[in-house]
Amino acid sequence: MPWRGLAADGPLERIAAQYCLADVALADFLADVMQVEGDGVTALILDQHDPAAFAPVAAMTVGDFRDWLLNPATTGEDIAAIAWGLTPEMAAAVSKIMRAQDLIAVAAKIEVVTRFRSTLGLRGRLSTRNQPNHPTDDSRGIAVSALDGLLMGAGDAVIGVNPATDSLPDYIRICEVLDAIRSQLAIPTQTCCLGHVTTALAAMSAGAPVDLVFQSVAGSDKANTGFGVTLAMLDEAADAVAGLGRAPKGANLMYFETGQGAALSADAHHGMDQQTMETRAYAVARRYRPLLVNTVVGFIGPEYLADGKQIIRAGLEDHFCGKLLGLPMGVDVCYTNHSYADQEDMDILLTALAAAGVNFVITVPGGDDIMLNYQALSFHDAGFIRQTLGRPPAPEFESWMAQHGIGAADISLPGLDVVLAQLRLPAA
Amino acid sequence: MKTPGPNFRDDMRALTDARLNFGPRGAAMTTKDALGFALDHARAREAVEAGLNLPELTGALTRLGLDHRVVTSAAANRETFIRRPDLGRRLPDGDAASLADLGPVDVALVLGDGLSAMAVALNGAAFMAALARRLRELGLGFGPVILAHQARVALGDGIARALGAQTVVMALGERPGLSAADSLGVYVTHLPRTDTQDSARNCISNIRDAGISVDDAADQTARLITAMRVTGQSGVALSQAIAAGALPRSSP
């Protein structure tokens, strides 16, 4: 039974669609493309559009725009300057007529730098999220996984836990465990419990050490409703976390995750393709000047991204579109066991993303997330890129590593049990 | 610098199943760890790609005194099933018609491959036999066990309607993780419809030799069915009804 959806029925129809798309004027995308009455994300997109920033490319077609982006005379600064003139639909459209190398080449020009205790996104560097998840949120279980990563130099973007439950006491305890590790080891990084934004709000009211507020976001009001989130809630959380005063002035304080297929799986795509819906989520994210944004690219399953080739393509698309719209884009390079993908596909995507200048990737012990039951990158994988392509972590974190001999060949590090025993963790 | 004690790996492994690095730091994963990961992934992939072993399953059910029928979802083969979850939820009209004269029954029992036929091969028949014993004790009627190829959870809804059953128990292989590829999941739904939401189901997960035992799972399933028949609800609504005191104290 063939799909009767938006996808082309065959190779020729696919190329015909690309020819048509290349001839569409960029300005045509300034109309309400989704055509859903009262959608707040559409309103946000139209509100964000800056005509002055758009002016340099306002007369171009999608095809002209691709050529302009790839032109060696067009610099990363030129591209950054039009970010708020572009709408998500324009970014998604041009990506559809770009090959993998085009997506890499243009993204590599764009530098998006964000700051908290570490400076992320500097050219030539690659940061990592250290993701020490545990199926029952056990404090010492989380701590030992975090330490395992830290001893391998992982965690300069964030040490971030996806909680197994969304209970407030657990959220607060996880924040305290991560803050204990960070402060006692004086690590120049930030921590995050990736619970729901409403839980974060309650935890901040209760005085929990919240560095970053996290939320999954999507490209329509209906899809965000599925996540139980509204723009008003995000506004409130952004104000609250800024009010805590934990970060230097001007720091970036929000963290968002996205992923192709999220809107479609919630029947909230309003007939639009999954990649355009993904890019619309970036309009939500950029409203809050986030420290971190990443697509969880292969998590959703083979009905959305069937195999390694599709996951690789989607990872490069999401990274490119995010950077084009001015986001500090990272990628969770990952897959589930019912996808036609394996660790080798992840190696290829990681290498391509490093070439494209990805801000950060997500790393877990041994590449196996034992709470979310999927495979991501390992701490070793980040080490592979550092050694092979020469991509050090954030400068502050690099100094911290050097100070403790982490990554140095001639220093033997203490065992996990020794470091764990030295930590003073909050009572469970 | 202190050398780790002899038991430190065991101590760390008692804290978490995470694949901690006990090899050198700053180098590639050791051959042992790299091959171990690849082996676990291969097990998971085999479990996903495997089909139901009908001769073994039907033989086991017959030995346990249970009759059976076989259906296939609208996803006719494994490749379609993986890419089209919607088809795996739908029972073709012909298969529905073939079940019509078997009902009505109180409870429909369905054993589907889901994403791990390995889980079904290991514990599927034993779970159905354990549950059947409890349903007989409760005086509840059930028809033959329906063995379902290319089955997602919601396929059970159509099977239950074809059988005229009020409650459906769908047992099927869960998506394999890297650490376990043999988990059976059980979904119990009361008064299933064509548009039943997942929030209207109760689930018992991680049924395997190293997880929840078949007997414990059958006990829990029987208690859920009893509670559903008292309250007329399942899923989140059942939990709310129980919280509101809809059941006598001795009930679950």
Image (cartoon, coloured by chain):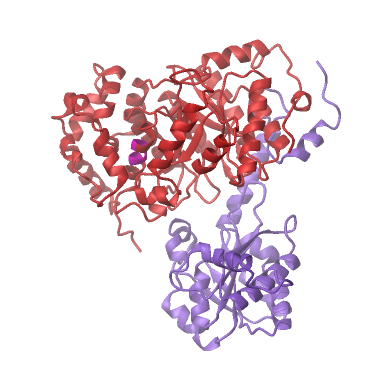
Chain colours: A red, B purple
The magenta region covers A279-283
**Can residue A93 be seen?**
no
- At horizontal 55% and vertical 14% (from top left) the residue drawn is A396
- At horizontal 50% and vertical 49% (from top left) the residue drawn is A339
* Residue located farthest toward the right when viewing the structure as drawn: B6
Say which quarter of the image contains residue A168: top right
- The relative height of residue A40 versus residue A181 in the rendered view (above or below) is below
**Can residue A31 be seen?**
yes
- At horizontal 45% and vertical 46% (from top left) the residue drawn is A307
Q: Quadrant of the N terminus of chain A?
A: bottom left
Say if the magenta span includes residue B119.
no
- The relative height of residue B50 versus residue A181 in the rendered view (above or below) is below
Q: Position of residue A195 (x, y in %)?
A: 55, 41
Total tally of numbered discs in the picture: 0
Q: Nearer the viewer, residue A45 or B221?
A: A45
Image check: A151 left or right of A122? Answer: right
Say which quarter of the image contains residue B141: bottom right
* Residue located farthest toward the left when viewing the structure as drawn: A59
Q: Nearer the viewer, residue A415 or A165?
A: A165
Q: Nearer the viewer, residue A68 or B225?
A: B225
Say which quarter of the image contains residue A207: top right
Say if the magenta span includes residue A282.
yes
- At horizontal 60% and vertical 56% (from top left) the residue drawn is B47
- The relative height of residue B18 versus residue B49 in the rendered view (above or below) is above
Q: Magenta-highlighted stretch: main secondary structure?
A: helix
Q: Position of residue A377 (x, y in %)?
A: 56, 34
Q: Quadrant of the C terminus of chain A?
A: top right
Q: Position of residue A335 (x, y in %)?
A: 52, 43
Q: Nearer the viewer, residue A136 or B108?
A: A136
- The relative height of residue B166 versus residue A286 in the rendered view (above or below) is below
